[in-house]
Amino acid sequence: MKKKYIVGNWKANQTAEQVQLWLDEVSQFLTTNYGEKEVIVCPPFIHLKQVADYVKEHETPLGIGAQDVSAFGIGAYTGEIPASLLREFASYGIIGHSERRSYLHETDSQITEKFSMANQAILHPIVCVQDAATQLPENTVFVAYEPVAAIGTGNPDTPENAEAVAKTIKEQHPSVQFVLYGGSVNSGNVASFTMQDNIDGVLVGKASLVASEFCKIIANA
Ligand code: PGA
């Protein structure tokens, strides 16, 4: 059976107390064997250490990702968090999320810089694309296909269309091994995406915030 990636992207949500409660519930759930599923959570930067310490202490099978990676390295870049520092707590980094492209005007060339910084730090970059035509940095392995109209709207793409886009991305970029689908994924629709041949998992925003719903997504994926 192919490995499925279930990635929760908390975006700008969760207090430290909420993080603790979420971890208690999800960690408990993950003690059941979900060996063929790789579960990853991407908290805001300020919670990365809390999550990393928890996972280490409880030996929770939960991967950790950052929601962004700086295009700069270590040095005088106020407010930036470079990949090599993130690597202390995280193994993955989301790059080029459509919210960053639109609210922070991130460009393809910045995304390429971020990708290269992440790779150098051995922080697996998950590059978000809005369709099969979005530019991808060379040697991209993980892609998240997230059509803008599906993000946070309750109107997911159809599994058939998502599968067609995932297939095209893999055909056009032989380095791509995993394509995740993101956009209004919940416990009711997750299986319709993960059952597709070319979809290797999901990137879940809103529905990842509630521990019980996230656990159902993992179970149903
Ligand atoms: P959503 O967000 O699940 O809230 O639609 C998906 C994403 O942007 O990662």
Image: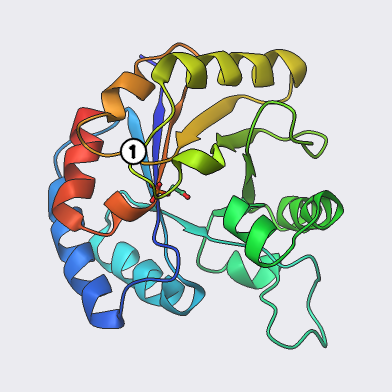
Question: Of residues 116 and 198, which is closer to you in this image?
Answer: 198
The residue labelled by disc 1 is 185
Query: Does the image show residue 30?
Result: no
- Against 133, residue 112 (above or below) is below
Quarter of the picture holding the N terminus:
top left
Q: Where is residue 181 in the image (x, y as percent from the top left)?
A: 47, 32
- Against 212, residue 155 (above or below) is above
Which quadrant of the figure has residue 118?
bottom right
Local crowd size for mark 1, using a 10 Å CA cut-off: few (<14), some (14–19), many (≥20): many
Asked if ligand 1 lies within 8 A of label 1, the reply is yes
Question: Of residues 87 and 174, which is closer to you in this image?
Answer: 174
- Against 51, residue 41 (above or below) is above
Q: What element carries label 1?
A: loop
| Most distant residue in the right direction | 109
Question: Of residues 22 and 107, which is closer to you in this image?
Answer: 107
- Against 39, residue 134 (above or below) is above
Q: Which residue is drawn at 75% across and 22% down?
A: 173
Tell me which colouring the rendered structure shows: rainbow
